[in-house]
Amino acid sequence: SRESLRSAQRSRRWEPVCRSALEALAAAKLVPSGDVTLLRRALEASGARRCFGSALGDLLHGRRAPEERVEAFAAALRELDVARWSLATFFAFARAPEHHLLLRPGETSAAAAALRVDIEFRAEVNGATYARLLRLAHALAEEVAELEPADLFDVHSLLRSIAAPARASEVAR
């Protein structure tokens, strides 16, 4: 919550924030376990917890555009050597799925290709790719409006469904 982040900032105790973040990752099961493990290990150092917690607060409660907040959060993750798309996008997606989308590189690239949309995907976490993904998600939401998607979580599920056959055929090759 915003208050727990403010409290951590005042007290300079980031452990509860980091513990909650790791618990959210584990409970959601949307981020690859290897990425969660990397983050868990990185957050063992107190400086890393401060860096992560502060950046997480800006990501979740900042006033900048979504892609700018994701890019800034990714910069903090790069400092911790854990900059992964799934980690960079999970927390904002979990907090505000009406505005954010979870990007899982393999699934997202496969879904975009199946839809014949070039999101100019780059492996390094960046705001431009995220902005293109958000545009794709909103366009897809408009396209399936009669299905009444509640938020981008529904669009995320649709993208995963679109990606599954494409990824299965890649594995079969």
Image: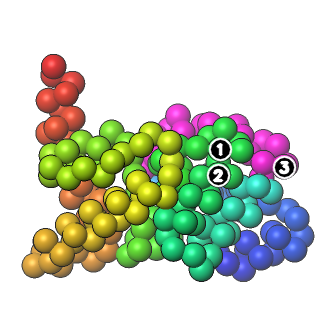
Across and down, in percent, residue 52 comes to: 71, 55
Q: Nearer the viewer, mark 2 or mark 3?
A: 2
Q: Residues within 10 Å of mark 2 (few under 14, many from 20)?
A: some
Which quadrant of the view contains residue 58? bottom right
Q: Secondary structure at mark 3?
A: helix
Q: Position of residue 109 (x, y in %)?
A: 29, 44
Q: Earlier in the sequence, mark 1 or mark 3?
A: 3
Q: CA distance from mark 1 to mark 3?
A: 14 Å
From the image, tell me which residue sits under label 3. Answer: 47
- In the foreground, 77 or 122: 122
The magenta stretch is 29-49
Q: Amino acid at mark 3?
A: Gly
Indicate the secondary structure of the residue bearing disc 1. helix
Q: In the image, is residue 14 part of the stretch drawn in magenta?
A: no
Q: Are marks 1 and 2 in contact (CB under 8 Å)?
A: yes
Quick one: which residue is furthest to the left in this view? 146
The residue beneath circle 1 is: 78
110 lies above or below 94: above
In the image, 172: left or right of 5?
A: left
- CB of mark 1 within 8 Å of CB of mark 3? no
